[in-house]
Amino acid sequence: MPSMLDAVVVGAGPNGLTAAVELARRGFSVALFEAHSTVGGGARTEELTLPGFRHDPCSAAHPLAVSSPAFRALPLERYGLQWLHPELPMAHPFRDGTAAVLSRSVGETAASFGPRDAGAYRRLVEPFLPRWDTLVRDFMSLPLTALPRDPVTLARFGLVGLPPSTWLTRRFRDERARTLFAGLVAHVMAPLGGLATGAVGLVFALAAHTRGWPVARGGSQAISDALAAYLKDLGGSIHTDYEVKRLDDLPPARAYVFDTSPTALARIAGFGNHYAHYRYGPGVFKIDYALDGPVPWTAPQARAAGTVQIGADSAEIAAALRAASREHRAPDTPFLITVQPGVADPTRAPAGKHVFWAYGHVPNGWTGDLTDAVERQLERYAPGFRDRVLARATAGPPELAARNANYVGGDIATGAVSGLQTLLRPRLSLSPYTTPHPAVFICSSATPPGPGVHGMSGHNAAKAVWRRLRQT
């Protein structure tokens, strides 16, 4: 290791790995330090239940990763990353055995909503589809890390997406479309009436139609391993089992980049109350299952979908989010996001078996057990589900936070996605990646564009770092 590195990155989640890669690509000397024994953060794969069952402890389906401008610019396929697409990106079943779907086809998706809303859905998404690659680059590079390539489309997207999602769904006349869209917004655990929640739902829908919602072959660890292998080929070094408690624990460097929560950064760097007003959102209660066969969904479409949302209607979804985020209680009937990787990737489990995960929203730091409520909800849409369970591994907020220190109180978004913090995080600032120390930067999901496995927070932060390095 050189006596003075150009950059040290702390935290080997997707954003930390991406920041390190971006800096190394530009000729800077980089070392990355990770407290755990393996890289990955929110993109890991482990045998959590039984031998041969490979589970993703957090992210499993990757609409943002496959569309990410940062990842698409890197040769990750050369390092083993392979995207596998289920027949349907997402399905939202109903109690009557039917389902609304998010298909690669706009027409199939619109038809699943019914004739009264098919035209409204087409009018909503079709103007943005031809410009998706440019739009996603502009959307995920804000604020002020790059000039928009298509400011007209970005402005049009803002007019549709910045209001609450409840405004956007007024264009739908029936509940099927409203329910599916409410579920899309709930992926970031945001109350449905919050600022820019329309944009959240719209991004997920557009991603499905343009590049899909794939899984990584072998598990989400493949994303992290590809980034790590590329970093090493670029000359960067990775040090695992290395917990950083203060800046003095790190080697001398011209810049330090933290893929950590703002709370942890403040503690390590001695920033006192600099991030005292940063808010953490609801936690999740997650269950990983080893199953002796596929989930017995009543709706045929759900059997072909990589991701399945579970919520009877938009009111039930809103009530579940409200209970976890505002009423500080576990919902009686949780809204569930579930992923069944085996519909696209049979390597995840022994022949004929499946891995499956489901999570529901709970208050930050909640210490209860949601297992029974989750499984009652699953049984409503997949009768006989419990009979398929070979083993389960549960993780509430305390366990999730112990596995990944960025998930403060079980908040897998590393900060509430509500109010102004949806767009301006971790502080009200035009330079969100900088900190009170000119050589210290933050690149986690607590910075724009926010949560998800896409590497864009790391990519954007790396721009701020290399601009500083070239000035000094």
Image (spheres, grey):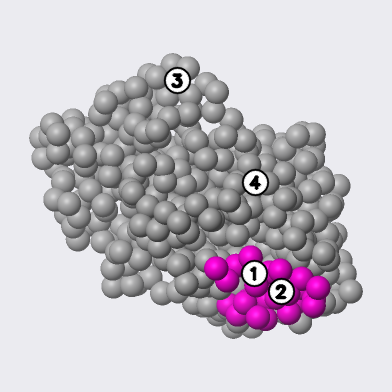
Q: Amino acid at mark 1?
A: Arg
Kindly identify which residue carries mark 1.
Answer: 123
Report the amino acid beneath label 3. Answer: His
Looking at the rendered image, the quarter that the N terminus falls into is: top left
- Count of picture labels: 4
Query: Which residue was labeled with disc 3?
Result: 274
Q: Earlier in the sequence, mark 2 or mark 4?
A: 2
Q: Residue furthest front?
A: 152
Q: Nearer the viewer, residue 173 or 175?
A: 173
Q: Give the CA separation, mark 1 to mark 4.
A: 17 Å
Distance from the alpha carbon under mark 2 to that under mark 4 = 21 Å
Question: Compared to 410, does 340 lie above or below?
Answer: below
Residue at mark 2 to residue at mark 1: CA–CA distance? 6 Å
In the image: residue 217, left or right of residue 56: left
* Residue wearing tag 2: 119
Q: Closer to us: mark 2 or mark 3?
A: 2
Are the residues flagged by discs 2 and 4 in contact, CB closer than 8 Å?
Answer: no
Quarter of the image holding residue 419?
A: top right
The magenta-colored residue range is 101-127
Q: Which residue is mark 4?
A: 163
Distance Cα–Cα, label 4 vs label 3: 29 Å
- Judged from the image, the secondary structure of the residue bearing numbered disc 2 is helix
Q: Secondary structure at mark 4?
A: loop
Q: Amino acid at mark 4?
A: Pro
